[in-house]
Amino acid sequence: MAGPQVVVVGGGPAAAALVHGLHRGGHEGSVVVLAGEGCTPYDRTAVSKGLLTGEVPTAPELFPEVLTADVVRHADVVEIDRAAREVVTGDDDRIGFDRLVLATGAAPRVPPVPGLDGPHASTLRDAAEAAVLAERLRPGARLVVVGAGLIGLEVAAAARTRGASVTVLEAAPTALSRVLPTVVSEVVLSRHAAEGIDVRLGTPPSAVVSSSSSSGQAVVVLADGTELPADHVLVATGVAPRTDLAAAAGLAVDDGVLVDERLVTSDPAIMAIGDVARVRAADGTTARHEAYTPAMAMGQHAARTILGEPTRFVDVPWSWSDQLDLSIQVAGWPDRADRWVLRGSAEDLDAGLFAFGVRDGRLVAATGVSRGRQVGRIVRGAQALVAAGLDVDDAALADPSTDLRRLARTG
């Protein structure tokens, strides 16, 4: 007997991992991926890194042996007909499903600032946008980046590597505030400053206007009247989950499509994974993850659920960022920490500086920065400790001789 027909809406890493997991698990039904981008899924971590620096000429495809042209279709889904168990495309095709998986991702948030949605500014979410931006990153070009989060600072680093002049504007008083404590983000900012990148905190733009002279294609106007000539403006102020399709179908949404611990929505025939999904944990808290590795983990988990192995999704999110010669890693939920325990020193970045987020005596987050890959060993070990949910001792966290992975195993 054939297995269920699975329809996936979206062609990002979560969708790719789902299809790969179904293939490896011996799924006997059909699988259709409806991707609006018009290409097979690819490694999106290259978008703000290698595609901009030129180190990666094209974004690597994900699981090309599975995600073939007869599986992935270029189609925009405009409606979910839950009663008929069908999705409707922009061409008015109706495709039936036994199990529907929403992997619609997220779209850039653009602040309501005059000119940020105009011809002199762009966002960065896919390979096509990266190719256009890369063409602008010429030696001597003037780039203004709005937003000092991971993407904004990755773009700033890539642009400076290409010889562009870069100014970063951040409305908040700190950079990278969603993922790093200030003591770590200051190290990153110091490295950017040493490279000649001008990061201005507490400084949002007031407008982007066309230049009236030959000084540049645009002028970014600040609240105090300062004018910054710019050949281009990159808006990197976060993303919003693409929930319109789910909301129109009557699914529960709240800054993401709400799913349970099996990644199932309010309709048992529909799942949601990746950036669009807001997962409800056993303790009632919810979280939405905007990173490559959690998206892949959710796709793999959804595949197991469809294959008849429903388990709780309990993945501890992990993400990374390479900026100049620094490697940054984050595991867990930094926003849940009420205090931070430090290990290492900003004076020795070969060994690395780490900050461990603690709440109610338990490790909830681990962050770090190093020159090279030292950061990975520590943060990955701490990730296991976050997953274990054990009480931790501050002295053990701060001690460089403590093996955090072993501590997670032994308690």
Image: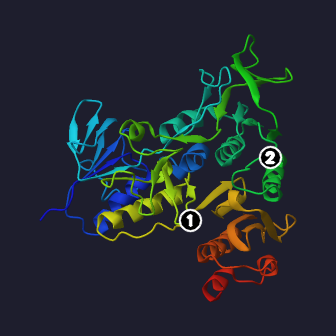
Residue linked to disc 1: 283
- The spot of residue 201 in percent (x, y) is 82, 40
**In the rendered view, would you say 182 is above or below 374?**
above
Compare residues 177 and 153 and report the one nearer the observer: 177
Q: Residues within 10 Å of mark 1 (few under 14, many from 20)?
A: few
Residue depicted at 36% across the width and 69% down the height: 310
**In the rendered view, would you say 142 is above or below 267?**
above
Q: Quadrant of residue 17?
A: bottom left
Residue depicted at 56% across the width and 55% down the height: 287
- The spot of residue 408 in percent (x, y) is 63, 82
Q: Quadrant of residue 238?
A: top right
Residue depicted at 28% across the width and 52% down the height: 68
Tell me: 291 left or right of 68. Answer: right
Q: Quadrant of the C terminus?
A: bottom right
Residue depicted at 70% across the width and 79% down the height: 391
Q: What secondary structure is marked by label 2?
A: loop
Q: Residues within 10 Å of mark 2 (few under 14, many from 20)?
A: some
**In the rendered view, would you say 141 is above or below 104?**
above
Residue furthest out toward the top: 212
Residue furthest out toward the left: 1
Q: What secondary structure is marked by label 1?
A: loop
Tell me: 215 left or right of 381. Answer: right
Residue linked to disc 2: 174
Compare residues 76 and 361 and report the one nearer the observer: 361
Tell me: 28 left or right of 324. Answer: left
- Residue type at mark 2 is Thr
Q: Quadrant of residue 354?
A: bottom right
**In the rendered view, would you say 179 is above or below 349?**
above
Mark with earlier residue (1, 2): 2
User: Circles 1 and 2: CB distance less than 8 Å?
Assistant: no
